Image (cartoon, grey):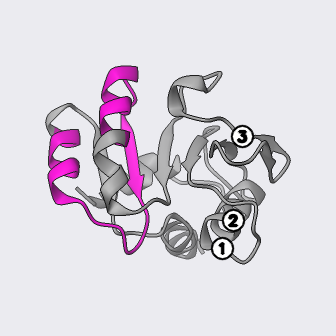
Amino acid sequence: MNEPQTIRNMLGMLGHPHPDGPTSPRTLAVIGLSDDPSKPSHSVSAYMQQHGYRLLPVNPAISEVLGERSYASLSELPIKPDVVNVFRLPKFIPAIVDEMIALGLKNLWIQLGIVHLEAATRAEQAGIHVVMDRCILIEHRRYQALLK
């Protein structure tokens, strides 16, 4: 969990990434993406979108956010995302892991301040790469800075 190579892989920064975005197209299913610009899920996702990542919002309460259609669950997504990025309370993580296992999804990013060790361990035992209690925006900026 949280290995530097796993973080780089999830960000799509294999080898020497382009400073403006991933070296390979990356899709982020963002669970809990809010349409409220003051919420971290919105600002972090907007940043990632501006840096070349395709967003697949997962929030049954909204129909669209950041110009993308929102889906009610991971199983409704039209494609398999490269990374599942989670902005939900820890109590929701086990069900997200269950759905990822059922769908064969391989990369779980649990945002800064969100920790569920049992679910993360279960995910890793099922072959899912896990980054937990880290902000994808902060890590993206950090790896970009290393390139300069």
The answer to whether residue 15 is seen in the rendering is: no
How many angstroms separate mark 3 from mark 1 (CA)? 16 Å
Q: Earlier in the sequence, mark 2 or mark 3?
A: 2
Q: In the drawing, does residue 90 fall left or right of residue 27? A: left
Q: Residue 79 location, x and y as percent?
A: 61, 23
Q: Secondary structure at mark 1?
A: loop
* Residue 53 falls within the magenta-colored stretch: no
Q: Is residue 131 above or below residue 71?
A: below
Q: Secondary structure at mark 3?
A: loop
Query: Which residue is denoted by mark 1 in the rendering?
Result: 39
Q: Earlier in the sequence, mark 3 or mark 1?
A: 1
The answer to whether residue 125 is seen in the rendering is: yes
Q: Quadrant of the C terminus?
A: bottom right
Q: Are marks 2 and 1 in contact (CB under 8 Å)?
A: yes
- For badge 1, the amino acid type reads Lys
Q: Residue 137 location, x and y as percent?
A: 56, 68
Query: Which residue is denoted by mark 3 in the rendering?
Result: 70
Residue situated in front as seen by the camera: 30 or 32: 32
Q: Secondary structure at mark 2?
A: helix
Q: Which residues are magenta?
A: 96-124
Residue situated in front as seen by the camera: 17 or 66: 66
From the image, state whether disc 2 or disc 3 is nearer to you: 3
* Residue 118 falls within the magenta-colored stretch: yes
Q: Residue 52 location, x and y as percent?
A: 72, 50
Q: Quadrant of the N terminus?
A: bottom left
Query: Which residue is denoted by mark 2 in the rendering?
Result: 42
